[in-house]
């Protein structure tokens, strides 16, 4: 994958210098934090108000959930795998590898969460996320009860659904825009725990 490949191919990628100041600041912060700029940032900057709304929701999920960060990333990867979303599987697979300290887990979840090397509770969590993704009208009280039996609180169940729902949006936009994963994302978290 060439370094010069654009973040997305079907819409114009805005020049960062021409974006509103708050988007420029967020992009600069992300570039500094990660050491590179994940392509989702310049891609979503195509629509600045939507960029703000999307990342505000994402930040709220990540910063204010009783779920562990690795659990949130498991939900994202299972959802994105069900949607065949290359960008989000690669990007959040990297985050999952880092937060779970497991170089193998992301591909297992993206390919088939039912056979992944995870606990029964995490399998139930991913089952629920995939149901929200593929058959949301079929979510029942029994699905909630199953998660509660595995120790998930109502707030955690809400956050599993919210994370899956947000990434259904993200996956669909990544497909529509032909969002391309950064080359760096493929390698992050591959060395396993140190």
Image (cartoon, rainbow, N blue to C red):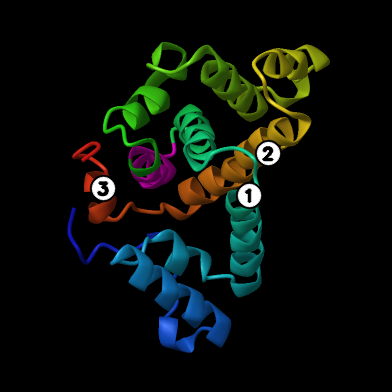
Question: What's the residue at 77%, 23% (across, down)?
Answer: 137
Q: Nearer the viewer, residue 14 or 9?
A: 14
Number of residues whose C-alpha sits closer than 10 Å to that of mark 2, classed few (under 14), some (14–19) or many (20 or more): many
Give the Cα separation between the discs numbered 2 and 1. 7 Å
- Say which label, 2 or 3, has the lower sequence index: 2
User: N-terminal of the two: label 3 or label 1?
Assistant: 1
Residue 35 position (above or below residue 164): below
Residue 145 position, x and y percent, is: 76, 14
User: Majority secondary structure of the magenta segment?
Assistant: helix
- What residue is shown at x 48% (from left), y 50% (from top)? 174
Q: Which residue is mark 2?
A: 159
Over which residues does the magenta segment extend?
85-97
Relative image position of residue 101 (x, y in whole percent): 32, 36
Task: Where is residue 175? Give x, y as percent.
Answer: 47, 46
Q: Residue at x 62, y 41 (%)?
A: 163
Q: Say if residue 13 shows up in the picture.
A: no
**SS of the residue under disc 1:** helix
Using the image, tell me which numbered label, if any, was put on residue 188.
Answer: 3
Residue at image point 65% right, 55% down:
60
Nearer to me, 8 or 60: 60
Which comes before the other along the chain, label 2 or label 1?
1
The image's mark for residue 183 is none
Residue 187, x across and y down, in percent: 21, 46
Q: Which residue is mark 1?
A: 61
**Between marks 2 and 3, how big is the CA–CA gap?**
26 Å
Instruction: Verify whether residue 19 appears in magenta.
Output: no
Above or below — where is 171 with respect to 142? below
């Amino acid at each position: 994958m060439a370094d010069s490949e654009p973040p997305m191919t079907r819409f114009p990628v805005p020049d960062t210098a021409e974006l509103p100041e708050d988007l420029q600041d967020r992009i600069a912060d992300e570039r500094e934090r990660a050491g590179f700029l994940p392509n989702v940032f310049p891609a979503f900057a195509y629509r600045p108000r939507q960029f703000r709304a999307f990342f505000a929701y994402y930040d709220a999920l990540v910063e204010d959930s009783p779920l562990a960060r690795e659990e949130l990333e498991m939900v994202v990867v299972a959802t994105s795998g069900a949607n065949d979303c290359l960008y989000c599987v690669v990007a959040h697979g990297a985050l999952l590898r880092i937060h779970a300290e497991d170089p193998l887990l992301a591909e297992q979840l993206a390919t088939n969460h039912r056979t992944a090397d995870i606990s029964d509770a995490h399998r139930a969590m991913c089952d629920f996320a995939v149901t929200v993704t593929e058959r949301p009208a079929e979510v029942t009280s029994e699905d909630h009860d199953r998660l509660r039996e595995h120790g998930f609180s109502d707030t955690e169940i809400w956050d599993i659904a919210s994370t899956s729902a947000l990434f259904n949006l993200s996956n669909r936009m990544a497909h529509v825009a032909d969002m391309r994963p950064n080359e760096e994302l493929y390698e992050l978290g591959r060395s396993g725990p140190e």
